[in-house]
């Protein structure tokens, strides 16, 4: 039984679901009018779907045979995620049918029938348009279903390990400042800014600054995720699956209270003066 980083797999399932959703939006925006433009656009989306199917197969292979299969409820989540392969492949098939139904332009053999007149061409395009529209709509629905399966699998894995303490992943014990920073980032809207000299600062969605030391610990243990961006635009900072599990499993650390009336310990200088 292979030992894998389950929180990391949860994050990657969610990333895959987000990419399926983005591709669904792209397919829905395609203009189903026959012609060379449709052929070019549909062809690009078919390639994109096959790439996502490949990623889904990798995720399924990693989860299969891992320690997750011993967790009660894992069979349901794995079976649900396996539907991504069929659903996404159906979406690619629907787009492939649009390629087949898209009227093409070309010349006939020498001595063959005369080239079709413009009225016949327009008729062919008019007849193909609703067929192409239906194929694209079906592909978009199957991409939406693929995204849903990815998100459901990620939620299922999270629920399974949350409900079974013996199968929970090992997570660092957070100190108060680290836990507070993680809670602030979990509220959403956190950004990291990198200056010209490489110095970085992080602020929460409410504008409050997050100290570098606690954030460095969160980043080191992969409890947060920083979006890759270019230039000097703020990078989105979000809580990873491991970070959310840490918030769910751990109680907020309590700072050491000050005893009322207790005199402060004398400093080294004070001791020497004595």
Image: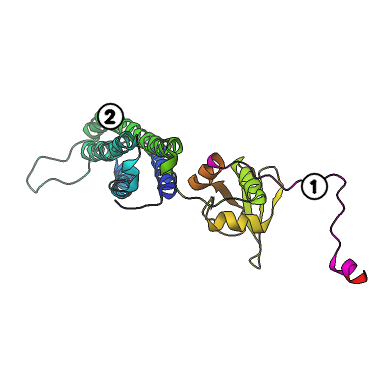
The answer to whether one can see residue 94 in this image is: yes
Magenta part, dominant SS: loop
Give the secondary structure at mark 2: helix
User: Of all residues shown, which one is farthest toward the right?
Assistant: 273
In the rendered view, would you say 79 is above or below 235? above
The quadrant in which residue 84 appears is top left
Kindly identify the residue that appears in the image at 76 percent across and 46 percent down: 257
Front residue of this view, candidates 107 and 17:
17
Membership of 267 in magenta stretch: yes
Q: Residues within 10 Å of mark 2 (few under 14, many from 20)?
A: few
Quadrant of image for the C terminus: bottom right
User: Of all residues shown, which one is farthest toward the left?
Assistant: 111
Residue tagged 1: 258
Residue tagged 2: 126
In the rendered view, would you say 266 is above or below 47? below
The percent position of residue 1, horizontal first and vertical second, equals: 29, 51
State left or right for residue 214 relative to residue 111.
right
In the rendered view, would you say 197 is above or below 145? below
The percent position of residue 9, horizontal first and vertical second, equals: 40, 48
Give the secondary structure at mark 1: loop
The percent position of residue 96, horizontal first and vertical second, equals: 24, 40
Kindly identify the residue that appears in the image at 60 percent across and 50 percent down: 174
Magenta region: which residues? 249-271
Q: Distance between the residues labelled 1 and 2?
A: 81 Å
Membership of 204 in magenta stretch: no
């Amino acid at each position: 039984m292979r030992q894998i980083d389950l929180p990391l797999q949860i994050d990657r399932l969610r990333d895959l679901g987000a990419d399926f959703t983005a591709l669904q939006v792209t397919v829905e925006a395609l203009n189903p009018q026959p012609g060379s433009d449709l052929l070019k656009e549909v062809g690009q989306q078919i390639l994109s779907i096959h790439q996502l199917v490949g990623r889904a197969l990798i995720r399924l292979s990693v989860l299969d045979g891992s320690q997750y299969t011993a967790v009660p409820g894992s069979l349901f989540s794995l079976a649900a995620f396996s539907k991504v392969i069929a659903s996404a492949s159906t979406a690619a098939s629907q787009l492939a049918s649009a390629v087949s139904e898209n009227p093409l332009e070309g010349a006939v053999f020498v001595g063959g029938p005369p080239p079709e007149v413009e009225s016949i061409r327009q008729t062919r395009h008019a007849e193909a348009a609703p067929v192409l529209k239906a194929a694209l709509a079906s592909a978009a629905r199957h991409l939406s279903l693929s995204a849903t399966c990815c998100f459901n699998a990620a939620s299922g894995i999270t629920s399974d390990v949350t409900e079974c303490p013996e199968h929970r992943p090992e997570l660092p014990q957070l100190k108060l400042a680290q836990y507070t920073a993680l809670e602030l980032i979990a509220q959403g809207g956190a950004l990291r800014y990198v200056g010209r000299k490489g110095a970085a600062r992080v602020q929460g969605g409410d504008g409050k600054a997050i100290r570098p030391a606690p954030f460095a610990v969160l980043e080191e243990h992969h409890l947060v995720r920083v979006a890759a961006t270019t230039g000097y635009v703020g990078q989105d900072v979000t809580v990873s699956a491991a970070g959310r599990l840490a918030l769910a499993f751990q109680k907020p650390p309590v700072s050491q209270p000050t005893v009322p009336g207790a005199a402060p310990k004398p400093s080294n200088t004070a001791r020497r003066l004595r």
